[in-house]
Image (spheres, rainbow, N blue to C red):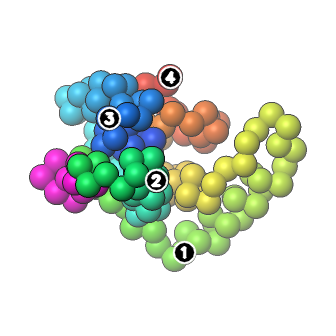
Amino acid sequence: MGVFLDTGFYLGLCHPKDKYAELSEKILKELAIGNYGVLYTSYFIINEVTTLAAIRSKNNLKVFNHLEKLLWGSEKIATILPFDLNFELETWQLFKKENTIDLKEKKTMSYTDISSIVLCNHHQIEYIVSFDSHFDGFLQRIFQV
């Protein structure tokens, strides 16, 4: 079993004022036990969380340093899955499909979120740590809010 880690989870871990900070810490303790298998993320998630961390923390160096440790440093928690160029077309096609159907009940899904679904499908990852319900139907969210 493996679990994909989404942007909101990382943001909650590195930014103490984030609305999911406490929950993210609790989830991390559960994940650390190892019952959920290997943890994964992607460069798209890193791109998104670093940008959001900068904006929401007003470029707080302490937040940056903590995020750096979680992504690449001494507290690294996930394996970063490479996004192969072969996934581009598949991601684009799913992005168009999901965002051009009747969206009355749904919000637009970001390219990053669609890329996460594609990566998980190709790596047989069924679970995601995310606070976003739009993954429902694609991946099983664990630790739902």
- Kindly state the secondary structure of the residue where label 4 is placed: loop
Looking at the image, residue 75 sits to the left or right of residue 132; the answer is left
Q: Residue furthest left?
A: 74
Q: Is residue 83 above or below residue 122?
A: below
Q: Nearer the viewer, mark 1 or mark 2?
A: 2
- The dot on residue 16 is 3
* Residue at mark 3 to residue at mark 4: CA–CA distance: 18 Å
Q: Quadrant of the N terminus?
A: top left
Q: Is residue 4 visible?
A: no
Of labels 2 and 3, earlier in sequence is 3
Q: Which mark is residue 55?
A: 2
User: Can residue 57 be seen from the camera position used here?
Assistant: yes
- Residue corresponding to mark 4: 145
Local crowd size for mark 2, using a 10 Å CA cut-off: few (<14), some (14–19), many (≥20): few
Q: Amino acid at mark 1?
A: Asn
For this rendering, which residue is in front, 15 or 119? Answer: 15
Q: Main secondary structure of the magenta part?
A: helix
Residue type (three-letter) at the residue carrying disc 3? Pro
User: Which mark is on residue 86?
Assistant: 1
Image coords of residue 122 (percent x, y): 49, 58
- Residue 140 screen position, x and y as percent: 52, 33
| Highlighted magenta segment, given as a residue range | 64-76
Could you tell me how far apart the alpha carbons at marks 1 and 4 are, in whole angstroms?
34 Å
Residue that appears at 62% across and 64% down: 91
CA gap, disc 2 to disc 4?
24 Å
Q: Is residue 126 magenta?
A: no
The front one of 23 and 37 is 23
Label 2: which secondary element: helix
Tell which circle, 1 or 3, labels the residue nearer the N-terminal end: 3
